[in-house]
Amino acid sequence: EVQLVESGGGLVQPGGSLRLSCVTSGFTFSSYWMSWVRQAPGKGLEWVATIKQDGSDKYYVDSVRGRFTISRDVAKNSLYLQVNGLRVEDTAVYYCARGKPTYFDNWGKGTLVTVSS
Amino acid sequence: EIVLTQSPATLSLSPGERATLSCRASQSVSGYLAWYQQKPGQAPRLLIYDASNRATGIPARFSGSGSGTDFTLTISSLEPEDFAVYHCQQRLNWPLTFGGGTKVEI
């Protein structure tokens, strides 16, 4: 069974940082593109970032480029999102998603990031 | 950026009825469009990819059609568990984008 479990969310002040993690199991992690997708409270889905299987290419939505960094650790079957310079508008549930390759065929339950003073 | 516009925003139907949801792209996405279902408090679930291919385990009552800029998700006969929000997503170009969603309610 494919599983993706996010962690690392929380309440942070504007300008703060967090590291989101996604531990995966049930599939060959190194064979898949992986992504982060977020959803602000009561809003739609927004793609945030994607990383290729070998980590050679990374893609970001403009609003986070330069502040967020996606990475992966094949040995730990884990995906990460380092989020710096957080803004109020970054408040959202952040989902880890397995790529097909840039559709999302399996999702975690998400981790909530709240940016507030 | 490719903008996806979903309509209607809300669709009020009864179990057993047919649901027809629309997703229109601001420019052609060829056939690179997916549909997701999201229930309250849950993560989205992939239903349809490449406009018309059902994802693994998705019932046959869900079907997708369209190409270019106009796409449709059809639920042939609504089951109680189908009342949810449906999102479309394109993967032709970066940034990947989603539509605003259609809520199917009783």
Image (cartoon, rainbow, N blue to C red):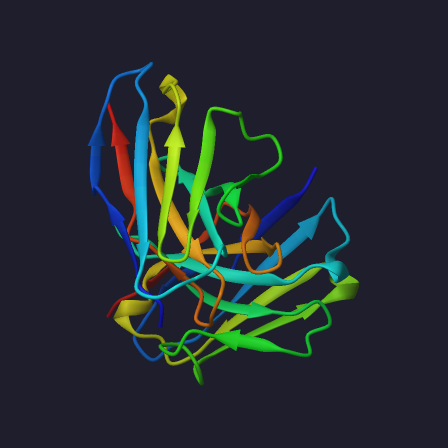
Closer to the camera, A38 or B21?
A: B21
Closer to the camera, A20 or A104?
A: A104
Vertical order, A70 against A28 (above or below) = below
Vertical order, A82 against A5 (above or below) = below
Q: Residue at x 30, y 47 (%)?
A: B101
* Horizontal arrangement in the rendering, residue A90 relative to residue B29 (left or right): left
Q: Which residue in the rendered view is the most extreme toward the top?
A: B16
Closer to the camera, B72 or A97?
A: B72
Q: How many marks?
A: 0
Q: Position of residue A22 (x, y in %)?
A: 60, 57
Q: Quadrant of residue A40?
A: bottom left
> Is residue B91 visible to us here?
yes
Q: Where's the C terminus of chain B, which quadrant?
A: top left
Q: Residue at x 61, y 61 (%)?
A: A34
Q: Where's the N terminus of chain B, which quadrant?
A: bottom left
Closer to the camera, B13 or B20?
A: B20
* Horizontal arrangement in the rendering, residue A54 relative to residue A86 (left or right): right
Q: Residue at x 54, y 47 (%)?
A: A107
Q: Position of residue B94 (x, y in %)?
A: 46, 72
> Is residue A112 visible to us here?
no
* Horizontal arrangement in the rendering, residue A66 relative to residue A72 (left or right): left
Q: Residue at x 74, y 44 (%)?
A: A26
Q: Position of residue A18 (x, y in %)?
A: 47, 70
Vertical order, B75 against B22 (above or below) = above
Q: Quadrant of residue B25?
A: bottom left
Q: Which residue in the rendered view is the most extreme toward the bottom?
A: A66
Q: Position of residue A102 (x, y in %)?
A: 56, 60
